[in-house]
Amino acid sequence: MAPILSLRNVELRRGTDFILNIERLDFRVGGFYLLVGPNGAGKSTLLQFLGMLLPPERGRLFFDGTEVRGAVMRQRLRRQITLVEQAPFLFDASVYDNIAFGLRLRGVRGDLQRRRVKTAMDMLGLQGFEKRPAKALSGGEIRRVALARAMVLRPRALLLDEPTAGLDQSILPVFEGCLKSLRDDGVTILISTHDAAQVRRLSGELLGLEGGRLVAPESSPISRLHIA
């Protein structure tokens, strides 16, 4: 089976400096990956690139064995890859409407839509939030709604940039249980994190990134990557 995502000789630059310089990286179907590294290592850029938001200046990206070419193809593939960024954007609408937005775009309506939204909300402790306006939510609640909006789509690949920053500690076991359930269903998951305890709990495959380059985990322990 081909990897769901593959990078070959990918370069992205800002001026004369590398943001990313990755020779080879593969993500298998149903794989669970934890991306670690110091601030400025390029973690968010890598997630945006894998989420089809940034084209490479050099190199090749493959999805399910097929090379990704052009903006039209990247836009189409975004329906199969969901990225939740560090500062997620919510529409000025109710929590329910925010979570259901992607489903509506995909033609999922009626009872099926309501069941999927309810399941995602229950998974993240958002019971009773359906009619609450997004602009009235706290920072942690916004993250939970954004995560529910991502999970409800059941993407083939889920990319999460510091997803638990600002989350109430009581929600963490539920959230991490959701991730494990998605992984068991064959969803490929990549999380960037500075939470060393989370790395230990989730037992995913560790990827180190420094200066836009991959670093072998065995030569770069978590402590060296400044994870606290």
Image: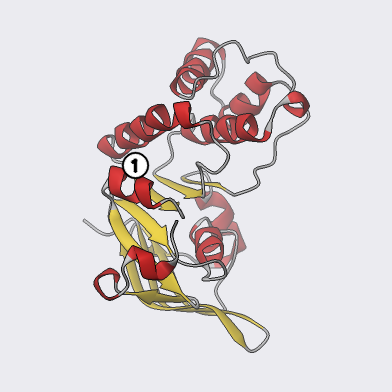
* Residue lying at 42% horizontally and 70% vertically, measured from the top left: 209
Residues 142 and 223: in front is: 223
What residue type is disc 1 on?
Val
Residues 205 and 198: in front is: 198
Q: Work out whether 37 lies above or below 77.
A: below
Work out whether residue 104 can be spotted.
no
- Residue 14 lies left or right of residue 158; in this view the side is right
Work out whether residue 200 can be spotted.
yes
- The picture places residue 78, in percent across and down from the top left corner, at 53, 49
Secondary structure of the residue carrying tag 1 is: loop
The colour scheme applied to this rendered structure is secondary structure
* Residue lying at 56% horizontally and 28% vertically, measured from the top left: 103
Name the residue beneath numbered marker 1: 187
Residues 167 and 190: in front is: 167
- Residue 184 lies left or right of residue 48; in this view the side is left
Quadrant location of the N terminus in the rendered image: bottom left
- The picture places residue 156, in percent across and down from the top left corner, at 39, 44
Q: Work out whether 190 lies above or below 222.
A: above
- The picture places residue 137, in percent across and down from the top left corner, at 70, 26
* Residue lying at 45% horizontally and 75% vertically, measured from the top left: 210
- Residue 149 lies left or right of residue 186; in this view the side is right
- The picture places residue 121, in percent across and down from the top left corner, at 51, 20
Quadrant location of the C terminus in the rendered image: bottom left
| Figure disc tally | 1
Q: Can you tell which quarter of the image residue 185 is in? A: top left
Label 1 crowd (10 A; few <14 / some 14-19 / many >=20) = many
* Residue lying at 68% horizontally and 85% vertically, measured from the top left: 15
Residues 20 and 220: in front is: 220
